[in-house]
């Protein structure tokens, strides 16, 4: 079982696939999955995306850096919403960001984040990496290394990594375990190259799961065979 986990989620977990804004049914499901984890005394941090509000790459009329700024701001909105949703069911949760100064946010300070995790609070990171041109996948890798997580769990809409797109090819085969190097060589896109590089360099494994299958998150954390394990070359 992993004792400290970084969970990477798309903003669509708050709205449903292809949705915008916040859908109470999906938010309630998300909160229930997190509650089950915290009840096991697992320390949890979350990096949340912004796909339910805006994606920087959709704003083709803006300069890339400015479009990414809007995307980063949208992730802070999701961080506050998720924090409040967790607080509403009695969980201690904090929203962390260094790109915005509002009363709901805690500054990005290592000691404060460490104290929150060890005291059982869920730490929700908003703002991505705080820099344009980087995805929230890269932010998840960076935050996982910063908090010394045991693993990154990437919650997706599919039940792991396949050798080809399962939505296009019926003969696609699910991969249970693969190394970062092999994934890169085979052109399998689990996370972006920057995220891969960070995880490889700092020996940080990643498990890719179908987040929308009830219980998958906890099962992955306690070591059951769920999804796909993407491991650094030297990881055991």
Image: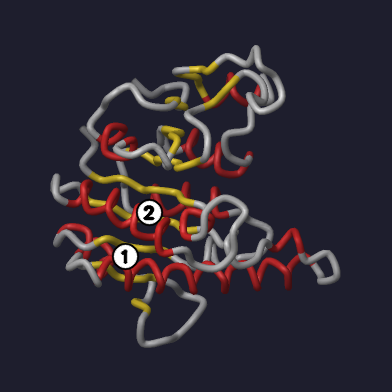
Q: Residue at x 45, y 36 (%)?
A: 210
Depth check, front residue: 161 or 52: 52
Q: At which x and y percent is residue 90?
A: 17, 68
Q: Which residue corresponds to mark 1?
A: 110
Depth check, front residue: 76 or 36: 36
Depth check, front residue: 114 or 192: 192
Quadrant housing the N terminus: top left
Q: Residue at x 55, y 68 (%)?
A: 21
Q: Residue at x 47, y 22 (%)?
A: 233
Which image quadrant for residue 213? top left
Q: At which x and y percent is residue 31?
A: 31, 57
Q: At which x and y percent is residue 51?
A: 60, 59
Q: Is residue 27 above or below residue 207?
A: below
Q: Is residue 108 above or below residue 210?
A: below
Side of 227 where 35 appears, left or right: left
Mark before the other along the chain sequence, 2 or 1: 1
Q: Residue at x 47, y 54 (%)?
A: 13
Q: Is label 2 in contact with label 1 (beta carbons under 8 Å)?
A: yes
Which image quadrant for residue 60? bottom right
User: Which mark identifies residue 207?
Assistant: none
Which secondary structure lies at badge 1?
helix
Q: Which residue corresponds to mark 2?
A: 146
Quadrant housing the C terminus: top left
């Amino acid at each position: 079982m992993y004792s400290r986990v970084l969970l990477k989620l798309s903003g669509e977990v708050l709205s449903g696939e292809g949705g915008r804004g916040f859908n109470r049914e999906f938010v309630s499901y998300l909160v229930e999955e997190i509650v089950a984890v915290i009840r096991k005394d697992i320390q949890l941090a979350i990096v949340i995306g912004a796909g339910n509000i805006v994606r920087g790459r959709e704003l083709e009329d803006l300069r890339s850096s400015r479009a990414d700024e809007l995307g980063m701001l949208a992730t802070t909105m999701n961080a506050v919403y998720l924090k409040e949703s967790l607080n509403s069911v009695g969980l201690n949760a904090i929203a962390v960001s260094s790109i915005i100064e509002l009363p709901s946010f805690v500054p990005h300070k290592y000691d404060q984040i460490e104290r929150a995790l060890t005291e059982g609070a869920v730490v929700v990171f908003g703002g991505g990496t705080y820099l344009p041109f980087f995805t929230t996948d890269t932010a998840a890798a960076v935050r996982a290394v910063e908090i010394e997580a045991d693993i990154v769990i990437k919650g997706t809409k599919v039940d792991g990594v396949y050798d080809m797109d399962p939505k296009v090819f019926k003969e696609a085969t699910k991969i249970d375990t693969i190394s970062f190097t092999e994934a890169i060589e085979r052109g399998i896109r689990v996370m972006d190259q920057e995220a891969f590089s960070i995880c490889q360099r700092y020996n940080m494994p990643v498990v890719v799961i179908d987040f929308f299958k009830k219980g998958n998150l906890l099962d992955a954390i306690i070591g059951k065979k769920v999804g796909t394990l993407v491991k650094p070359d030297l990881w055991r």
